[in-house]
């Protein structure tokens, strides 16, 4: 199993540049690889509220699972492992539908600067989540979620707000305009 305290540094083309201790990379705002997983059943998405003790964005709603793969580790395989560790879910194969780069700074001095791979999979079960990582989970209808994100964006993580649109397009049968793009870099 990979060291969860290290992240893989990458360039804007997702080419590996080495590794760094996770908190140091977040303090220095260095671009690193990440993934976001969205599980869905019909027109519903499984969301998690991040534990309030997380190093940033604690108490905010986000996609089913997110983390960082290790150096040389397959991103999909890492996402599947993390789903099992964090949410108690064995979702089977994941499908990468999108990737993007974003940068978000937080009041505690940390910065997320990530090349985020977005995966989806169908799932129709419950989550047995790690309470150190997740405060609560809920299934939300896509239509209701899109409306809530419009009126209360402050309740959601910054990467979720960016990743949701391509996921919504995918779930509605629309192909994202491009499979890899950058946005939110300040």
Image (cartoon, rainbow, N blue to C red):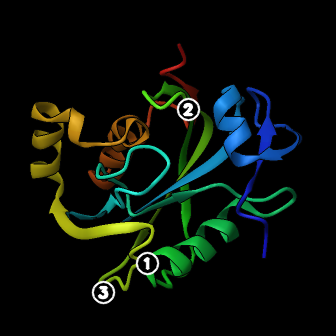
Residue at the disc numbered 1: 130
How far apart in space, not on screen, are marks 3 and 2 (Cα)? 34 Å
How far apart in space, not on screen, are marks 2 and 1 (Cα)? 23 Å
Give the class, few, some or many, for how many residues have Cα within 10 Å of label 3's Cα (few <14, many ≥20). Answer: few
Q: Is residue 15 left or right of residue 157?
A: right
* Quarter holding residue 9: top right
Q: Is residue 178 left or right of residue 26?
A: left
How far apart in space, not on screen, are marks 3 and 1 (Cα)? 16 Å
Q: Please state, as top left, top right, bottom left or bottom right, where the N terminus lies in the image.
A: bottom right
Counting residues from the N terminus, which is met first, the one under dot 3 or under dot 2? 2
Pointers 3 and 2 in contact (C-beta within 8 Å)? no
Label drawn at residue 39: none
Q: Residue at x 48, y 21 (%)?
A: 184
Residue at the disc numbered 3: 125
Residue 157 appears in the picture as rendered: yes
Counting residues from the N terminus, which is met first, the one under dot 3 or under dot 1? 3
Give the class, few, some or many, for how many residues have Cα within 10 Å of label 2's Cα (few <14, many ≥20). Answer: some
Label 2 element class: loop
Q: Residue at x 17, y 42 (%)?
A: 146
Picture coordinates of residue 132, whole percent (x, y): 44, 71
From the image, state whether disc 2 or disc 1 is nearer to you. Answer: 2
Counting residues from the N terminus, which is met first, the one under dot 2 or under dot 1? 2
Residue at the disc numbered 2: 110
């Amino acid at each position: 199993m990979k060291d969860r305290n290290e992240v893989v540094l990458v360039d804007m083309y997702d080419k590996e540049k080495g590794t760094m201790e996770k908190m140091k990379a977040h303090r220095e705002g260095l671009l690193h690889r990440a993934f976001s997983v969205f599980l869905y059943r019909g027109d519903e998405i499984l969301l998690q509220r991040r534990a309030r003790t997380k190093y940033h964005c604690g108490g905010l709603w986000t996609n089913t699972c997110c983390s960082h793969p290790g150096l040389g580790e397959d991103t999909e395989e890492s996402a599947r492992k993390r789903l099992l560790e964090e949410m108690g879910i064995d979702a089977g194969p994941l499908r990468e539908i999108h990737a993007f780069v974003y940068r978000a700074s937080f009041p505690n001095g940390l910065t997320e600067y990530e090349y985020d791979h977005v995966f989806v999979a169908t799932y129709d079960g419950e989550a047995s989540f790690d309470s150190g990582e997740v405060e609560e989970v809920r299934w939300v209808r896509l239509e209701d979620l899109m409306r809530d994100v419009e009126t209360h964006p402050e309740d959601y993580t910054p990467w979720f707000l960016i990743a949701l649109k391509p996921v919504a397009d995918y779930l509605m049968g629309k192909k994202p305009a491009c499979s890899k793009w950058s946005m939110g870099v300040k």
